[in-house]
Image (cartoon, grey):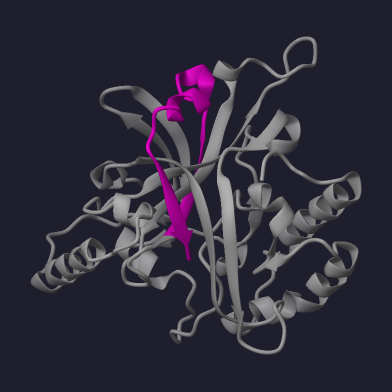
Amino acid sequence: MSGRGEDLDELVYHDNWMTMVELYGIRELSYETDRLPALSGLATLFKRALPLDTYLAGLWERDIHRQLFWNTSGTSRGSLADLVSSLGYGGDGRYIVPSWSWLCKQDLISFGYDKFNMDEYADYRSEYSYLRSSITPDGLGPTGKLRDASLLIRSRFMPIPYTTTKGRKSPRWRFMNAHIGYVADCELDWVEEASRDETDSERKGREEADSRRREGDENRGAKIMNGKRGPALLLLGSCAEPGEDGRPSGMNERYARGMVICAAPEIDPAACVRVGTFYSDPEDGGGLKLFEKCQQGEFLLK
């Protein structure tokens, strides 16, 4: 999809949906597996008003280029590996939702990122190719419990050295590259605890995971990222601040935004999961132009 691709009525309903999502995220449910069923009635009502749209685990397909860009007040404490292995699953190990759905977090949800508020910027558009979605219900309908869910998209990405994310005391982190300087401002879903030596068991598990990753046959992003333990910036969209005449600024002044992802061979040799979001500011030397020469790949997001 390119741009919003929506008419005015769709835009109003999608905006209303995101507003209600931000309120719903505050609620605490007795059981983690109740998250999707609790929202099912509301999703069914919206579906009647959005007959051409498809409901995807708390998001709407025709507006997914905006709705993927959510942040949460909750942050996991522990290693990145701990976060990746727990995403989408409840405490009892049962599948709940995909990592890219805001429903995988039982915390306050917001769309945007501080000054990067999508409604305040001009000419917002997607910067990726949306290939397909897959939803497997665990019941009669697509708005209730799920057995599995995934998105397949193609976009540019930039790996992040894993060591650069360690030692953070806050989920908010500025990614600086030794060669090019500023890259992006990130909102990560985990805060690394005090570092310690890797145990033999952990080393063996990591090596087995790396081996499974190398065995992947599909030419997707997880395979392209093969051998890199760290996460990556996955470009999703861009926008520009309006100029003095109210028109969008030039191409070199476009902001870039997207997801922070990480390969998840424990789930699927070809899969990646969301572990945060980012925006890149052209005024600081970043922006969309920074991604022009980055490699492209297909990413199976679980």
Q: Specify the quadrant of the image occupied by residue 267.
A: bottom left
Residue lying furthest left: 200
Q: Please give the range of residues in magenta.
A: 273-302
Residue 226's place in the image compared with 203, above or below, is above
Residue at x 67% of width, y 64% of height = 25
Residue at x 82% of width, y 61% of height = 52
Q: Position of residue 22 (x, y in %)?
A: 72, 57
Which of 254/182 is in front?
254
Q: Does 129 sit left or right of 267 as displayed? A: right
Q: Specify the quadrant of the image occupied by residue 80.
A: bottom left
Residue at x 64% of width, y 69% of height = 57
Q: How many numbered marks have been drawn onto this rendered protein structure?
A: 0
Residue 287 belongs to the span the image colors magenta: yes
Residue 233's place in the image compared with 56, above or below, is above
Residue at x 41% of width, y 47% of height = 297
Residue 88's place in the image compared with 234, above or below, is below
Q: Does 61 sit left or right of 272 as displayed? A: right
Residue 164's place in the image compared with 230, above or below, is above
Which of 188/17 is in front?
17
Q: Position of residue 28 (x, y in %)?
A: 65, 74
